[in-house]
Image: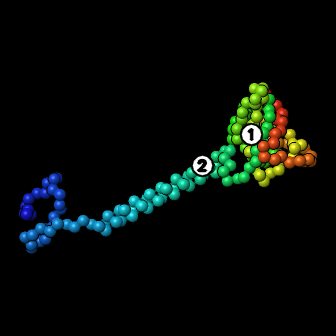
């Protein structure tokens, strides 16, 4: 048993409390209330960080170009002589309104042309008499696919059907 005059060393394992007027020292009990508060705080911080990461992921998916996880689409295969700087995730505009995105581009089997896969949002119907043109927005802008409706007569494109694109204007 230690006396009150002995200094506490850095190697002592138990803290003791001396009561005034008593020759005995009593060990200080571990504070279980503050430990519970600490674990609750850790759970709350972890939950907050998790919810923040989930919201960040949802926002990234929502605002990324070309991601259509939450919108039903159908594909139109566009045959063009040149992609003209078009990139996957480029916009597909019909009369200036975004109706889809470019999902992929592949060199055709004849190695002379390009097959561009357009993901068109299912809510938009495109007639087969429409013209497809590869254009750019502004003088140094992004490339996009423009769909120019003509008379809107005839059949409507279905999933996986093919169309011809007019050559892009090269400056």
On the rendered structure, is 92 left or right of 129?
A: left
Q: Position of residue 38 (x, y in %)?
A: 35, 62
Name the residue nearer the viewer: 30 or 136.
30
Which one is nearer the viewer's eye here, 143 or 151?
151
On screen, residue 113 above or below 74: above
* Residue 138 in sight: no
Q: Can residue 49 be spotted in the picture?
A: yes
Which residue occupies 75% across, 29% down? Answer: 109
State the SS at label 2.
helix
Residue 20 vertical placement versus 100 (above, below)? below
Residue 32 in percent (x, y) is at 29, 67
On screen, residue 58 versus residue 135, left or right, reads left
Q: Where is residue 127 in the image (x, y as percent from the top left)?
A: 87, 46
Q: Mark 1 points at which residue?
A: 117
| Mark 1 surroundings: few (<14), some (14-19) or many (≥20) residues within 10 A | many
Q: Image quadrant of residue 1?
A: bottom left
Gap in angstroms between the C-alphas marked 2 and 1 = 23 Å
Where is the C terminus found, in terms of image quarters?
top right
At x 67%, y 53%, the residue is 70
Disc 1 is placed on an element classified as strand
Residue 127, compared with residue 18, is above or below; it is above
For label 2, count other residues whose C-alpha is less than 10 Å away and answer few (under 14), some (14-19) or many (20+): few
Front one among 113 and 83: 113
Q: Which residue occupies 77% across, 52% down?
A: 122
Percent x, y for residue 168?
Answer: 80, 31
Instruction: Residue under label 2, please give it.
Output: 60
């Amino acid at each position: 048993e230690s006396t009150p005059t002995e200094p506490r060393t850095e190697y002592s394992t138990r803290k003791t409390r001396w009561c005034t007027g008593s020759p005995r020292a009593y060990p200080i009990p571990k504070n279980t209330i503050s430990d519970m508060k600490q674990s609750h705080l850790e759970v709350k911080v972890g939950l907050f960080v998790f919810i923040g990461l989930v919201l960040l992921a949802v926002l990234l998916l929502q605002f990324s170009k070309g991601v259509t996880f939450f919108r039903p689409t159908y594909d139109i295969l566009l045959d063009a002589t040149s992609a003209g700087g078009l990139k996957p995730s480029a916009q597909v505009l019909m009369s200036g309104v975004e109706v889809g995105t470019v999902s992929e581009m592949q060199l055709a089997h004849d190695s002379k042309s390009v097959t561009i896969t357009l993901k068109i949002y299912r809510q938009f119907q495109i007639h087969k008499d429409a013209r497809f043109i590869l254009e750019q927005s502004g003088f140094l802008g992004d490339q996009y696919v423009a769909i120019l409706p003509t008379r809107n007569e005839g059949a409507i494109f279905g999933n996986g059907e093919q169309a011809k694109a007019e050559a892009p204007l090269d400056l």
